[in-house]
C-alpha cells in the first residue's frame, strides 16, 4: 500500500473516492463541510432526507456530487462530537472502507485525519489509518478452494493535512503502521490456519523463512532431544500424548549490537484438547487459536525488523500440541522443570504455563533487559476482562505501567492485574514444589503467580491475551493482538516515537 499526504481540499482532489465524516446532530466534519460548500448543500440535503446519518459507523457512498472532482464521496457517521477518539476513528474508517471495498476505487483520500481525534497528532492518525486499511484489506483465503473472491483494488491512500509541517510525522506514522499491519497479518494468518496445517513444525518453518528473508534476524529450532538434554521436562510433559514433535523456536533480531535484548516468549499450543483433562466439545475448534501468543511475538519481531529499529529483540516460542493418548501426562503426575523446581500437574488443561515456565528459564541465557511472555493462558481472564482488554501482570509497577500506556497509544488496550503471595498460596502442593493450578477464584492471577516462580530476578511481565487474541461467532478469526501494543512498547524503548 502506498500512502501520501496532501493539503488539498476534499472537493478539489481528483481521487477515486473521498472519505468525509459527519457527527450526530448534523454537525459536519472538516472534509464534509468543504464538500457541502462546493456542492451547494448536498451533504446537508442528504442529512435532512435521512440518506446520511451521524451515527457511528453508518456510511453512505454518494456519486457524481456537483462541484467535487472525485466521482465518489463516502460519508461516514462519527458519533457524538465530544466522544470522538482514536477507537471511534478506527471504527468509522474501517466501516467506510468496507463500504467502498466493492467499488473500483484504487486511490482514496481520507479527510478524517483533519478531525480532532482526542488530541491524537499526525503521527498516530496516520499510523491508525494504515492499521485500519490493513484490517479492511485482510482476507483469509489460504484454505479456500475454487475461484477466490476479488480483493479490494485499493493501492493508494491519501491523508489530508491542515498544514504541510505535519507531512513528515504523518508519513512516519504510515510507515510504522504498515510494519505493524505486516506483523498483525502474519499473526492472523498463523492463527487462522487449522491445526492440521499449523503444527509446531509449520510455525518453525515460518520462523526459519523469516530468518532467511529478514536482515539481522537469525532463527534456531531446538528438537525434543535437545529440550530433554536441557531438562525441559515440564514442556515435554505437555507434548507427551501427541505424535507431532514439539519445537522450541528461537529468533534473534540484532538491531543494536552490544546491548541487552528484550525477550518475548509466546505460548505456541497449536491445538489444545485439554489432554487427559479433556475440554468439552462445543467450541473446541477454537483451540487452534491457542498459539496466538506465539504468532503475536513472531509478528512483533517482523514489524521491528521491517522498521530496522535500533534494539535487540529475541523471541522464544515453545510450540506443542496437547492431546490425550495412552502415553499422555496424567493428573497427579509430577515433572521437573528446567529450573529444577518440581510441579504436580493437577489439570493437564493448564498446559500453557507448563511450556512457558521452561521457555522463561531458557530466556535467562540471553541476559535480557526485559522479558515479556504472551499467552492465551486462562479462561478466567476472559471472565475478568471480557474480550476488550489484555491482562498485564508484573511485579515491576513501572514495567506494567509502560505496557499499559503502550496499549492506550496503540489502541490495543491492556489492564493491570495484581500478583501477590495471597494468590500464590493457592499453588501449594503436598507432593511437589508447586501445583500447576489453584482454585477457581482468581485463576488468571494464580496462573501469573505460577509463572512468576520462574522469573525471580528478571524484569518480567505477563500478558494474558485469552480474551483479545481472537473473535468468536460470525466474525470468528484471529485479531493480530497484541502486535500493536508490543510494537508500541518497543518503539518507545528505542526512542523511535516522535
Image (cartoon, grey):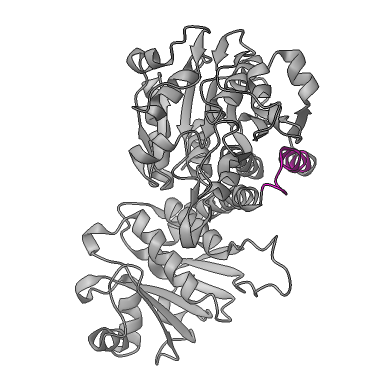
Residue 297 occupies quadrant: top right
Q: Is residue 494 left or right of residue 66?
A: right
Residue 476 percent across, percent down from the top left: 51, 57
Where does the image place residue 171, in percent across and percent down from the top left? 53, 55
Q: Is residue 121 something one can see in this rendering? A: yes
Q: Position of residue 175 (x, y in %)?
A: 57, 52
Q: Is residue 356 magenta?
A: no
Q: Nearer the viewer, residue 201 or 73?
A: 201
Instruction: Pick whichever, 313 or 157, lies toward us.
Output: 313
Depth check, front residue: 134 or 118: 134
The answer to whether any part of residue 170 appears in the image is: no
Identify the residue at image location x=47%, y=10%. Answer: 429
Nearest the camera: 210 or 16? 210
For the N terminus, the quadrant is: bottom right
How far across and how far down the image is residue 498, in percent? 46, 43
Q: Is residue 367 above or below residue 184?
A: above
Question: What range of the chain is rendered magenta?
Answer: 195-210
Amino acid at each position: 500500500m502506498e500512502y501520501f499526504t496532501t493539503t488539498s481540499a476534499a472537493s478539489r482532489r481528483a481521487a477515486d473516492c473521498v472519505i468525509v465524516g459527519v457527527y450526530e446532530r448534523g454537525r459536519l466534519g472538516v472534509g464534509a463541510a468543504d464538500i457541502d460548500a462546493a456542492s451547494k448543500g448536498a451533504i446537508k440535503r442528504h442529512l435532512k432526507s435521512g440518506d446520511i446519518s451521524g451515527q457511528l459507523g453508518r456510511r453512505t457512498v454518494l456519486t457524481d456530487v456537483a462541484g467535487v472532482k472525485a466521482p465518489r464521496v463516502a460519508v461516514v457517521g462519527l458519533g457524538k462530537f465530544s466522544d470522538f477518539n482514536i477507537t471511534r476513528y478506527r471504527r468509522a474508517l474501517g466501516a467506510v472502507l468496507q463500504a467502498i471495498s466493492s467499488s473500483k476505487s484504487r486511490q482514496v483520500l481520507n479527510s478524517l485525519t483533519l478531525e480532532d481525534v482526542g488530541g491524537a497528532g499526525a503521527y498516530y492518525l496516520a499510523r491508525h489509518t494504515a492499521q485500519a486499511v490493513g484490517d479492511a484489506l485482510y482476507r483469509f483465503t489460504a484454505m479456500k478452494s475454487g475461484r477466490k473472491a476479488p480483493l479490494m483494488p485499493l493501492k493508494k491512500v491519501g491523508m489530508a493535512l491542515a498544514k504541510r509541517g505535519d507531512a513528515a510525522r504523518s508519513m512516519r506514522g504510515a510507515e510504522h503502521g504498515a510494519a505493524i499491519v505486516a506483523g498483525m497479518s502474519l499473526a492472523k494468518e498463523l492463527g487462522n490456519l487449522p491445526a492440521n496445517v499449523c503444527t509446531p513444525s509449520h510455525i518453525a518453518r515460518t520462523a526459519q523463512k523469516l530468518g532467511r528473508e529478514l536482515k539481522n534476524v537469525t532463527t534456531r529450532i531446538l528438537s525434543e532431544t535437545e529440550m530433554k538434554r536441557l531438562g525441559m521436562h515440564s514442556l515435554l510433559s505437555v507434548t507427551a500424548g501427541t505424535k507431532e514433535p514439539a519445537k522450541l523456536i528461537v529468533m534473534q533480531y540484532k538491531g543494536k549490537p552490544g546491548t541487552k535484548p528484550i525477550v518475548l516468549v509466546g505460548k505456541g499450543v497449536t491445538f489444545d484438547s485439554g489432554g487427559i483433562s479433556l475440554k468439552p466439545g462445543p467450541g473446541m475448534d477454537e483451540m487452534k487459536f491457542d498459539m496466538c501468543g506465539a504468532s503475536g511475538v513472531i509478528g512483533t519481531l517482523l514489524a521491528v525488523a521491517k522498521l530496522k529499529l535500533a534494539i535487540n529483540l529475541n523471541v522464544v516460542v515453545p510450540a506443542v500440541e496437547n492431546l490425550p493418548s495412552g502415553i499422555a501426562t496424567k493428573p497427579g503426575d509430577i515433572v521437573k522443570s528446567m529450573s529444577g523446581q518440581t510441579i504436580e500437574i493437577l489439570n493437564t488443561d493448564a498446559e500453557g504455563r507448563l511450556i512457558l515456565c521452561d521457555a522463561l528459564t531458557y530466556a535467562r541465557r540471553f541476559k535480557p533487559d526485559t522479558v515479556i511472555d504472551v499467552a492465551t493462558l486462562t479462561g478466567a481472564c476472559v471472565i475478568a476482562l471480557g474480550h476488550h482488554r489484555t491482562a498485564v501482570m508484573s511485579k515491576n509497577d513501572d514495567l506494567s505501567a509502560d505496557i499499559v500506556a503502550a496499549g492506550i497509544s496503540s489502541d490495543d488496550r491492556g489492564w493491570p492485574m495484581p500478583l501477590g503471595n495471597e494468590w500464590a498460596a493457592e499453588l501449594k502442593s503436598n507432593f511437589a514444589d508447586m501445583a500447576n493450578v489453584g482454585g477457581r477464584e482468581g485463576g488468571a492471577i494464580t496462573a501469573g503467580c505460577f509463572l512468576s516462580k520462574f522469573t525471580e530476578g528478571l524484569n518480567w511481565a505477563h500478558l494474558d491475551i485469552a480474551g483479545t487474541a481472537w473473535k468468536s461467532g460470525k466474525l470468528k478469526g484471529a485479531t493480530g493482538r497484541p502486535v500493536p501494543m508490543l510494537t508500541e512498547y518497543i518503539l518507545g524503548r528505542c526512542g523511535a516515537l516522535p
